[in-house]
Image (cartoon, rainbow, N blue to C red):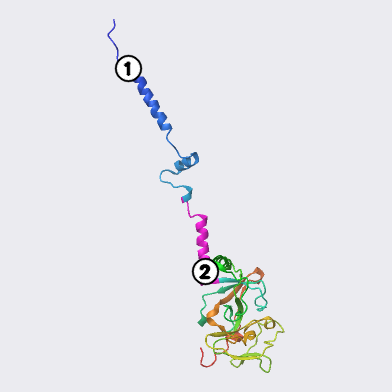
C-alpha cells in the first residue's frame, strides 16, 4: 500500500554532490606560483623572501668597492707606475710604487722621495698629446688611474734635496753636493755617479723645493729647469705625496729609506 509521493531525497543528494565537485574543481583551478618558487616558498614558511632579497647584488657590491677605492686614492694612498730610470737604483723602470697622500707639506723632509704634479714646473712645455679630453676621456682616465695606469698625467718622482730656505750648491772643491754649507755623502747614488755635471748655486724660496733624481746622469730634474720660470723649483703644493714603498714586482718589494746624510743637515738660519 503506497503512502504517497516521497520527497526527492535522491535528487537533493545528487545536487549536493554536484556542488561539492564544483567547489573542488574551482579550488583546483586557482592560479598558483610556478612550481619551483611555490615549493621554495613552502619550504621556508610564510613571510620568507625570494632569492632577490638574500643580500646586496653584485652590482651594488662593485659600486661600493669602487667608491672605497676612489676615496682611498683621493685621500690616503695612490699607486704609480714608474717608466724611467731617473731614480735608479732606488726605483727602477717598471716599478709600481705606493705614495702616502696623508703627508702634509710641513712633514716633508730633506731626502724624502716624492711624487709631484709637474704641469706648472717640469712639464709646462710638455703636455702629453694623448692626454684624456672630454667627459668620457676624463672618466676613463680617472678609472684607469685607480690602478696606477698612466694616461697622460704629468707626474714625476724625485728626491728632495733642498727645503724652503736651503742653500744648495754643487759642486765643492772635492766634487760634492753641499746643503747649507754641509757636504753630503750621497751613498744612495749609483756607483761611480758624479753628484752633478751641471754646476749650480741656489737658495730655495719659501713654498718651493729643489728636487733631484738619484741617477744624476739620466735625470731631468731641477737642474734642467734653472732657466725656466721658477728656476727649477717645485711648489710644495704640487707634491702629491711621499713615496713609501715599491709593491711590484714582488722581487722589488720594499720601503724607501730617507738618507740620514740629507735628513740630518741643520735647517738654514731663519727657517724651520
Q: As drawn, which residue projects farthest toward the left?
A: 3
Count neighbours of disc 2 (C-alpha within 10 A) and say few if under 14, some if 14 to 19, many if 20 or more: some
State whether residue 210 is above or below residue 96: below
The spot of residue 104 in percent (x, y) is 51, 79
Count neighbours of disc 1 (C-alpha within 10 A) and say few if under 14, some if 14 to 19, many if 20 or more: few
Q: Nearer the viewer, residue 84 or 178?
A: 84
Q: As drawn, which residue projects farthest toward the top?
A: 1
Q: Main secondary structure of the magenta part?
A: helix
The answer to whether any part of residue 18 appears in the image is yes
Residue under the image location 56 percent in, 71 percent down? 78
The answer to whether any part of residue 108 appears in the image is no
C-alpha gap between disc 1 and disc 2: 87 Å
The spot of residue 191 in percent (x, y) is 71, 82
State whether residue 15 is above or below residue 60: above
The quarter of the picture where the N terminus appears is: top left
Q: Is residue 61 magenta?
A: yes
The spot of residue 226 in percent (x, y) is 62, 87
State whether residue 169 is above or below residue 36: below
Residue 209's quadrant in the figure?
Answer: bottom right
Residue 223's quadrant in the figure?
Answer: bottom right
Q: Nearer the viewer, residue 237 or 241?
A: 237
Residue 72: mark: 2
- State the residue position of label 1: 9
Residue under the image location 40 percent in, 26 percent down? 21
First in sequence, mark 1 or 2: give its number: 1
Amino acid at each position: 500500500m503506497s503512502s504517497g509521493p516521497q520527497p526527492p531525497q535522491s535528487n537533493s543528494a545528487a545536487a549536493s554532490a554536484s556542488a561539492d565537485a564544483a567547489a573542488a574543481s574551482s579550488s583546483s583551478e586557482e592560479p598558483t606560483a610556478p612550481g619551483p618558487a611555490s615549493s621554495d616558498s613552502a619550504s621556508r614558511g610564510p613571510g620568507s623572501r625570494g632569492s632577490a632579497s638574500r643580500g646586496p647584488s653584485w652590482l651594488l657590491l662593485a659600486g661600493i668597492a669602487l667608491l672605497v677605492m676612489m676615496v682611498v686614492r683621493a685621500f690616503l694612498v695612490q699607486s704609480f707606475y714608474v717608466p724611467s730610470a731617473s731614480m735608479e737604483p732606488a726605483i727602477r723602470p717598471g716599478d709600481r710604487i705606493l705614495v702616502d697622500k696623508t703627508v702634509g707639506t710641513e712633514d716633508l723632509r730633506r731626502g724624502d722621495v716624492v711624487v709631484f704634479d709637474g704641469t706648472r714646473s717640469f712639464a709646462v712645455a710638455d703636455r702629453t698629446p694623448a692626454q684624456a679630453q672630454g667627459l668620457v676621456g676624463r672618466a676613463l682616465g680617472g678609472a684607469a688611474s685607480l690602478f696606477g695606469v698612466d694616461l697622460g698625467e704629468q707626474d714625476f718622482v724625485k728626491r728632495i734635496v733642498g727645503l724652503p730656505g736651503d742653500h744648495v750648491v754643487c759642486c765643492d772643491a772635492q766634487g760634492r753636493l753641499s746643503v747649507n754649507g754641509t757636504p753630503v755623502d750621497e751613498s744612495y747614488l749609483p756607483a761611480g755617479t758624479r753628484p752633478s755635471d751641471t754646476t749650480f748655486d741656489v737658495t730655495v724660496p719659501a713654498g718651493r723645493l729643489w728636487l733631484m733624481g738619484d741617477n744624476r746622469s739620466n735625470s731631468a730634474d731641477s737642474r734642467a729647469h734653472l732657466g725656466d720660470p721658477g728656476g727649477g723649483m717645485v711648489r710644495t703644493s704640487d707634491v702629491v705625496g711621499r713615496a713609501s714603498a715599491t709593491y711590484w714586482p714582488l722581487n722589488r718589494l720594499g720601503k724607501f729609506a730617507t738618507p740620514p746624510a740629507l735628513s740630518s743637515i741643520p735647517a738654514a738660519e731663519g727657517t724651520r
